[in-house]
Image: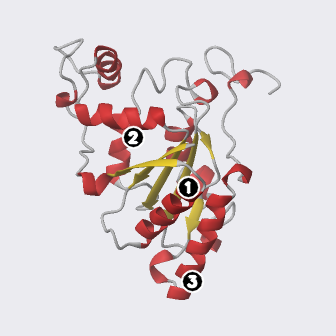
Amino acid sequence: MRAHIVHAHSQPDSFVSAMRDVVRGRLEAAGAAVTESDLYAMGFNPVLSPKDFGERHDPTHLTYALEQRYGYESGTLAKDILAEIEKVLAADLLVFTFPVFWFSVPAILKGWIDRVFISGPFYGGRRIYGAGGLAGKRALAVFSLGGRQHMFGPDAIHGELEHGMLRHFLQGALGYVGLEILSPFVAFHAPYVSQEDRTRILADLSDYIDRLDRIDSLTMPQLDEFDRSFAPLSGT
């Protein structure tokens, strides 16, 4: 198996970085070839720009998604984007390690998605969800947050986590391009727990990675339940 880790934490001694190290170690112990994009360490630029395109299909007006497709086909996308695309396309499993900020992912990870998950090889037209460009690959999110576990759920103060707070990332980004989304590993209340609890969380994560092939996947929209315009079929 080929795995690629996308790591989004600025501090190498953080708990999220420790989780990243556990993920990498267990995957390599299982025989996986692991690559990594440590976004802060790389100084990855998360900001969209006309400079992302060495050659423009339409030099008079920038429609970013359309220029992404043209730039990829012509080989004129910025080199940092092309390098990340190659890592993703080569992987069987993508792992995202990050802290939750303000009900979302860190800005640097959002910018990585914006620049790397491009129109064409990743999605386009009806090529979304199960027909997306990354269909057949799996993704796992491993993240920390400050809230306690009881704060998340159907009747909890923050509502659902996977299908609520982080739906925009898990479904709107990862699922949209065809990835099978494994149920995420969540380190709750991470900044406030004891060292003993942190050690237990890392041990739980190690076991989680060892059981990847038995982890349930999140439910995503099924295209056969919608018509050509993506309107729901009657009776579904």
Q: Point out the frontmost of discs 3 and 1.
A: 1
Q: Point out the frontmost of discs 2 and 1.
A: 1
For the point 47% across and 27% down, which residue is it? Answer: 122
Towards the viewer: 158 or 168: 168
Q: Whole-Å distance between the Cαs marked 3 and 1?
A: 23 Å
Q: Are marks 3 and 1 in contact (CB under 8 Å)?
A: no
Q: Position of residue 12 (x, y in %)?
A: 33, 68
Q: Position of residue 126 (x, y in %)?
A: 56, 18
Vertical comparison of 219 with 65: above or below: below
> Does residue 32 appear in the picture of this structure?
yes
Residue tagged 2: 113
Ranked by sequence position, the earlier of labels 3 and 1 is: 1
As shown in the figure, which amino acid type bears the numbered disc 1? Leu
Towards the viewer: 82 or 127: 82
Residue tagged 3: 197
Residue tagged 1: 27
* Element type at mark 1: helix
In screen coordinates, is 109 left or right of 188?
left
Ranked by sequence position, the earlier of labels 2 and 3 is: 2
Vertical comparison of 22 with 53: above or below: below
